[in-house]
Amino acid sequence: MQSRKLIVPLLLLLTLGLAQFGFSQVLQSHTPKRTLGYVNPVTGAFEPLRQVTVPDALTPVTPTTGTLTFRFKITVKATIPANSVITCNANASVFEVSSGGVFEEEASALATGSGASWTCTAVIHYSWLLSTPGTDQVSFSTTTGLEYGFQVTATNGSQTLVVPVASRISSQPLSTIAVPATGASTTENISVTL
């Protein structure tokens, strides 16, 4: 009789314990899925985070390399102040849709010349880890400027400071091109009037 009294509570305890595991499985399957994202401060709308495809770590990406040369022919019609320089700046950027990567390069140089005729060359040597170079595009933009500095001296005459001033700047986008083959040299000719 005592063993019977002992078996009934044990069976009851075992049944309740297994029921708890069963209920937890049911409740877990009804938990709502959460969407990761952020509130766009401009629109105020919730935007989910986008999935970015990461290249397989076992498949190395071969760098796409080359040289971009930007040759500027600058016609100066503006007054050239004393102590001024003419600069050229080139920017190349690739946005790779497949990986979400952004690659940007920039180069600057000082122009040479006199009077109304000046030339400037900015060179970019690039090495980009592009997953899909055959379908990617390179966007170019340039800026050319006529800049000078004026000297400010402290009232006690002990220190001087040169303050740069841009008297004339011209910016322009250039056409978009396909990513050049590895090792290629690409030249862009730009005419600018300042």
Image (cartoon, rainbow, N blue to C red):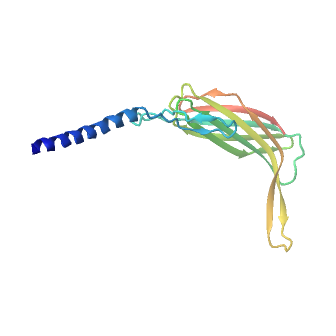
Q: Position of residue 162 (x, y in %)?
A: 80, 60
Please state if 75 lies on the left or on the right of 17 as rendered: right
Q: Quadrant of residue 45?
A: top right
**What residue sits 85% from the left and 40% below the top?**
76
The quarter of the rendered structure image containing the C terminus is top right
The quarter of the rendered structure image containing the N terminus is top left
Q: Position of residue 54 (x, y in %)?
A: 47, 35
Number of numbered labels in the structure image: 0
Q: Position of residue 26 (x, y in %)?
A: 37, 32
**What residue sits 72% from the left and 32% below the top?**
189
**What residue sits 41% from the left and 33% below the top?**
59
Q: Quadrant of residue 177?
A: top right
Please state if 96 lies on the left or on the right of 175 as rendered: left
Q: Nearer the viewer, residue 132 or 145?
A: 132
Q: Quadrant of residue 93?
A: top right
In the rendered image, the residue lying farthest to the top is: 135
In the rendered image, the residue lying farthest to the front is: 1
Please state if 130 lies on the left or on the right of 158 as rendered: left
Q: Position of residue 67 (x, y in %)?
A: 60, 36
**What residue sits 77% from the left and 38% below the top?**
171
Please state if 83 lies on the left or on the right of 180 as rendered: right
Q: Is residue 152 above or below residue 148?
A: below
